Amino acid sequence: MTKPIILPLFFLLITLITVDSQAQSKELADRLFKVHETYREASLTQRRFKQKDILPLISKRQGNALYQIEKVGESFEGRTIQMIKVGNGKKKVLLWTQMHGDEPTATMASFDIFNFLEGQNDGFDDLRKKLLDNTTLYFVPMLNPDGAERYQRRTMQGIDMNRDAAARQTPEAQILKGLVDRLKPDYGFNLHDQSPRYSAGRSPKVATISFLATSYDYELSINDVRERSMQLIVGMNKVLQKYIPGQVARYSDDHEPRGFGDNVQKWGTTLVLIESGGYVGDPEKQYIRQLNFMAILSALDKISDNSLTKENREEYYNIPENGRWVYDLVVRNATVRQSGKSFTADLGINRSEVNYANASKFFYYSKIEDFGDLHPQYGSQEVDATGLTIEKGKLYPTAFKNVSEISKLNALNLLKEGYTYVRLAPDANTRALGLYFTTAPLHILRSGQAVPTGTPGLGATATFILKKGGKVKYAVINGFVHDLDDFGAEKGQGIVE
């Protein structure tokens, strides 16, 4: 008679413990999210920083008893790569950032975490003690400083370091493999950025954070090591949903035998790959940085007390896969006139970053990347052009000596008259600059540069007007939309070709 009673009570108790644990995790995550501004590293405000910008942040921690700082090698160009050790716990965690030089979000979050670990008397002292007593954290910020110098993905050798785990042709890959061999970490965090155009599944929502529990074989097997990766990701997804609902995704589990994540998992370290994607209105990824701070600390908390094992690994597969369903801008239902005929088409436009000022800054160069029926795709920004006709803008008849003269023009009046192009005079000294930008919302052509012909279409620079009844309603200049009834010239982002 007792067994039918005791068994349900046992499962009820387990359920209550699990629910309570999840509630505590979400409460902690919420507190961490709110306190981030207190510990945000104030010297890192934009994502295009270089190694010289973080070296003082490492140097100032030399001599601090909390840390051990070690030179672990040099990049191809001879830049010192350092590791920062903090904590004395049994569980070893290796976290590395910027193995791709243009993926800096988690580097910023790492220094926020250091600031947090140095805090006190703020209600988090118990968490700090728990982390530092139960885990030993090994951070390698900016594993690819040569790439960061140029804000490029690959190393100076032109090799994608995340495809160099097997051959190890780069010194940076040799350093990471050496650390894995020496430290034998229980857990690893492979911290990346991804394109802001990935979607969370087949949806209009941009994938702000994406995860992967990397596969160690082609059969996508799941052992205890990989299962823990899935459980950690399930826990992080739960706390992130409050802040980016529907904007967490995961990569396909396909095995990549050259990838560090796949190999580190195969070598016996529970590996979580985190990708920081896009969030509309956050081009410098400061909000996503805050999410990294919260999610990583939340995961470390679960590692420190092993509460991650309470998560159901099957929920990992409920996270939608990354999709390619989002453009930066979609113009829908525009009327197109070609060869005396009319039809309706959508335009998918993406804004690509172009480096300048030694890669410390960038400007956008936008192209029409798809043309036709785009109803399965979405835009981070969308314009309904129903009833509007797309046309090539006109060239202003006067040529100007320099870009500064053009910036003084009344751009709104020009756009209302259908002028999108302005030409520089033959003696304007700008050719050496190559492709460049202007804050004026105009498309500037150098002397001799041909004016685009025909209706704007696939592959063209995204400059055109949308008219109704002879009146210009929208001007799209270099992929940026200007509503002429609600005009803001400060949105500039013009282009000089």
Image (cartoon, rainbow, N blue to C red):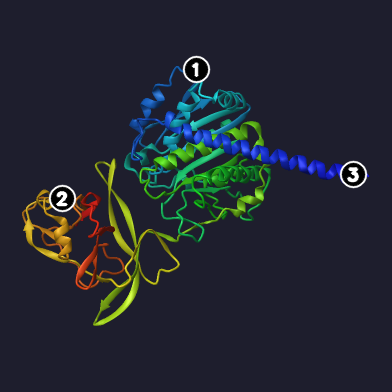
Residue visible at 62% across and 39% down in the picture: 23
Q: What residue does disc 3 label?
A: 3
Q: Earlier in the sequence, mark 2 or mark 3?
A: 3
Q: What residue does disc 2 label?
A: 432
Q: Observer-nearest residue: 145 or 344?
A: 344
What is the residue that sits farthest to the bottom in this orientation? 340
Q: Observer-nearest residue: 409 or 106?
A: 409
- For marks 2 and 3, give the CA distance: 85 Å
Secondary structure type for disc 1 = loop
Residue visible at 61% across and 39% down in the picture: 269
Hey, what amino acid is under mark 3?
A: Lys
Q: Where does residue 424 sit, x and y in percent of width and height?
A: 10, 56
- For marks 2 and 1, give the CA distance: 52 Å
- For marks 3 and 1, give the CA distance: 55 Å
- Dividing the picture into quadrants, the one containing residue 317 is bottom right
Q: Observer-nearest residue: 478 or 90?
A: 478
What is the residue that sits farthest to the front in this orientation? 485
- Dividing the picture into quadrants, the one containing residue 286 is top left
Secondary structure type for disc 2 = helix
Residue 287 in view, yes or no:
yes
Hey, what amino acid is under mark 2?
A: Ala
Q: What residue does disc 1 label?
A: 65
Specify few, some or many for label 1: CA neighbours under 10 Å numbering under 14, 14-19, or 20 or more: few
Q: Is residue 5 shown above or below 69? A: below
Q: Observer-nearest residue: 309 or 357?
A: 309
Q: Which of marks 2 and 1 is nearer the N terminus?
A: 1
Residue visible at 32% across and 78% down in the picture: 343
Q: Where does residue 167 sit, x and y in percent of width and height?
A: 50, 46
Q: Where does residue 156 sit, x and y in percent of width and height?
A: 36, 42
Hey, what amino acid is under mark 1?
A: Ala
Secondary structure type for disc 3 = helix
